[in-house]
Amino acid sequence: MPVQTRLTAAGERERHDTTIRGEPTVTDLPVPTARRLQPPRWRDPRLFLGLLLVLLSVTLGALVVAHADDRVPVYAARVALVPGQPVSPDDLRRVDVQLGGQQDHYLAAGVVASDRFVLRPVEAGELVPSTAVGGRDDVGVQPLTLGVDAGSAAALRVGARVDVYVNPVDPQDGGSRDRFRGPELALHGVSVSSLPRGGDGFGSGTVGDRPVQVMAPTNLVKGIIGQVDEGARVTMVPVPGAALRVER
C-alpha cells in the first residue's frame, strides 16, 4: 500500500495513505497460470494427414523417375542392309530409344536367328523395322551383276539405291549393234549389294567397264539377262537421296 511521509514542526514523521480508494493493488491482479506443452497424440488427425502427404510425395516421385527412362532396346543398322542378304549380328547394334506404343514396329534387341534375311533396304544408322526382316521364303529378290560405265560405277556404294535402264539394240541395225532403240526403265529403286573390283561380271566385257551387283526382283531377272545377251546397254542412275561415294 503506497504511503507518504513528512516531517512536522516537532520533527516527527507523519504518514499519509495515498492509496486511491477502490483501486486494486498489484497483489490483487490475477496471475496467469503457465500451460505445459502437451506431446502430440497418435490419434491426432494432423499427424495422419502429414504421413499421408509424405507417402503421396514419395510415390509420385518414384513414378516420375520410373517413367523418365522408359526406353526399350531395339536394333539399328550398323551398315546399310540390302534385301536378300542374311541378317548378321555384326551388321546390327543395340540402341535404347523411347518408342511409346510403336516398339512392336521395330526389331527388338536380342538373339538374331540364323535364318533371318533382309527384305527391304535399311540405311546405316536407321532403326530396323520388324517388317524389314523375314525368312528365306519371304525374299523376293536375287543378285544380278551388270556391267556399267566405270565413271558411273565409281560414285556408287553398297546400299545405294539406283534405277536401272536398259537400252536394247535396234533390230534393224543389220547386226552391227551400234544402234539402240532407246533406254527403258528395267528396275526401279533397287539396292546395290556388291561392287566387285574386277572379274567376269555379267556383261562386263561388252556393255560396261565395271561390274555392279544389284538385288533385282526375281520375276524380272530373266528378261534383263536376255536383253543384255542381245547387246543391250545398261545404265544405272542413283535415285534422289541415295548414299553415294564422295571422292575428296
Image (cartoon, rainbow, N blue to C red):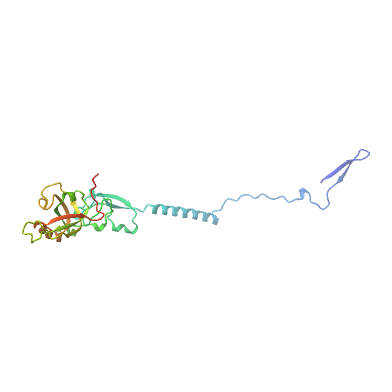
Q: Nearer the viewer, residue 203 or 57?
A: 203
Q: Nearer the viewer, residue 136 or 166?
A: 166
Percent across and percent down for residue 86 are 19, 53
Q: Residue at x 35, y 57 (%)?
A: 100
Q: Is residue 14 above or below residue 180?
A: above
Judged left or right of residue 103, residue 201 is left
Percent across and percent down for residue 10 are 94, 38
Question: Is there any visible trace of residue 96 in the rendered image?
Answer: yes
Q: Residue at x 47, y 55 (%)?
A: 56
Judged left or right of residue 201, residue 47 is right
Q: Residue at x 30, y 50 (%)?
A: 95
Q: Nearer the viewer, residue 101 or 150?
A: 150
Where's the C terminus, which quadrant? Answer: top left
Judged left or right of residue 59, residue 200 is left
Percent across and percent down for residue 139 are 18, 58
Q: Quadrant of residue 99?
A: bottom left
Q: Residue furthest left?
A: 174
Q: Residue furthest right?
A: 10
Q: Nearer the viewer, residue 80 or 108?
A: 80
Q: Quadrant of residue 234?
A: bottom left
Judged left or right of residue 171, residue 154 is right
Question: Is there any visible trace of residue 117 in the rendered image?
Answer: no
Instruction: State how many labels appear.
Output: 0
Percent across and percent down for residue 200 are 10, 49
